[in-house]
Image (cartoon, rainbow, N blue to C red):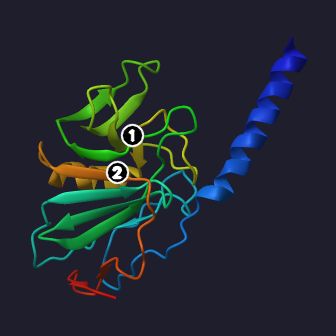
């Protein structure tokens, strides 16, 4: 029995590792040349990346709209129709896909724990569906690995949680975000069209 469990574990790990290459973003991250926060927790920094410009002169922007691209494994944050931040994400793995469509943040819970998955911690939880799907801090291995939620780097989850209100619209799409029309952050945190 031990041999079977070991063999199953090795085969599963190999299959999961093979999935990582098919979910890398085809689009470069928006460039920022001002002070910003970059997540570099215990996870591989190549996958747990985000940028949210922080300045001493301007208060942090509130969030008006969020767009999440499943194929890009990327989240984009907007204020006054301007891109103010972006983040890598890890969405639902095969069999537990993250639902697509238009949602709103219906609940916020700073120290949420899963009711479905062994009381798993989901810090900075922002609920999107009645079924329990939301955005929260979690591990980002570089490919879809959750049970349906959208995982964020811990510091990005904290920054987003502080700026999102209940009712904030969130669009989750199966479409890649076209880099030629995506707005990029500039050194002042303002937005320019490419």
Across and down, in percent, residue 56 comes to: 15, 76
Query: Which circle marks residue 180 in the picture?
Result: none
Left or right of 63 on screen, residue 8: right
Q: Residue at x 57, y 51 (%)?
A: 143
Secondary structure at numbered mark 2: strand
Residue found farthest to the right: 3
Disc 1: which residue: 99
The foreground one among 62 and 65 is 65
Left or right of 158 on screen, residue 20: right
The foreground one among 4 and 26 is 26
The foreground one among 194 and 117 is 194
Query: Which circle marks residue 172 in the picture?
Result: 2
Work out which quarter of the rendered image holds the N terminus and state it: top right
Left or right of 55 on screen, residue 184: right
The foreground one among 60 and 170 is 170
Q: Residue at x 29, y 68 (%)?
A: 85
Asked whether disc 2 touches disc 1, contact meaning CB atoms under 8 Å apart, the reply is yes
Residue found farthest to the top: 1
Across and down, in percent, residue 45 comes to: 54, 61
Work out which quarter of the rendered image holds the C terminus and state it: bottom left
Q: Residue at x 12, y 44 (%)?
A: 167
Question: Crowdedness of circle 1 by 10 Å Cα count: few (<14), some, many (20+)?
Answer: some
Question: Crowdedness of circle 2 by 10 Å Cα count: few (<14), some, many (20+)?
Answer: some
Across and down, in percent, residue 100 comes to: 37, 45
Q: Residue at x 39, y 40 (%)?
A: 99
Quadrant of residue 88 within the rendered picture: bottom left
């Amino acid at each position: 029995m031990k041999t079977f469990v070991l063999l199953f574990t090795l085969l599963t790990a190999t299959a999961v590792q093979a999935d990582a290459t098919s979910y890398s973003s085809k689009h470069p991250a928006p460039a920022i040349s001002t002070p910003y926060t970059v997540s570099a927790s215990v996870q591989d920094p190549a996958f747990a990346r985000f940028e949210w410009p922080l300045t001493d002169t301007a208060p942090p922007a509130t969030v008006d709209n969020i767009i999440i691209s499943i194929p890009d494994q990327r989240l984009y944050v907007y204020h006054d129709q301007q891109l103010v931040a972006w983040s890598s994400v890890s969405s639902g793995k095969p069999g537990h896909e993250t639902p697509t469509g238009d949602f709103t943040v219906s609940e916020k819970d700073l120290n949420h724990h899963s009711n479905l998955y062994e009381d798993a911690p989901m810090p900075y939880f922002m609920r999107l569906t009645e079924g329990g799907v939301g955005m929260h801090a979690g591990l980002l291995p570089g490919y879809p690995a959750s049970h349906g939620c959208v995982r964020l780097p811990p510091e990005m989850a904290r920054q987003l949680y502080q700026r999102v209100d209940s009712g904030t619209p969130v669009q989750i799409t199966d479409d890649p975000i076209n880099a030629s029309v995506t707005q990029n952050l500039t050194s002042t945190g303002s937005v320019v069209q490419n």
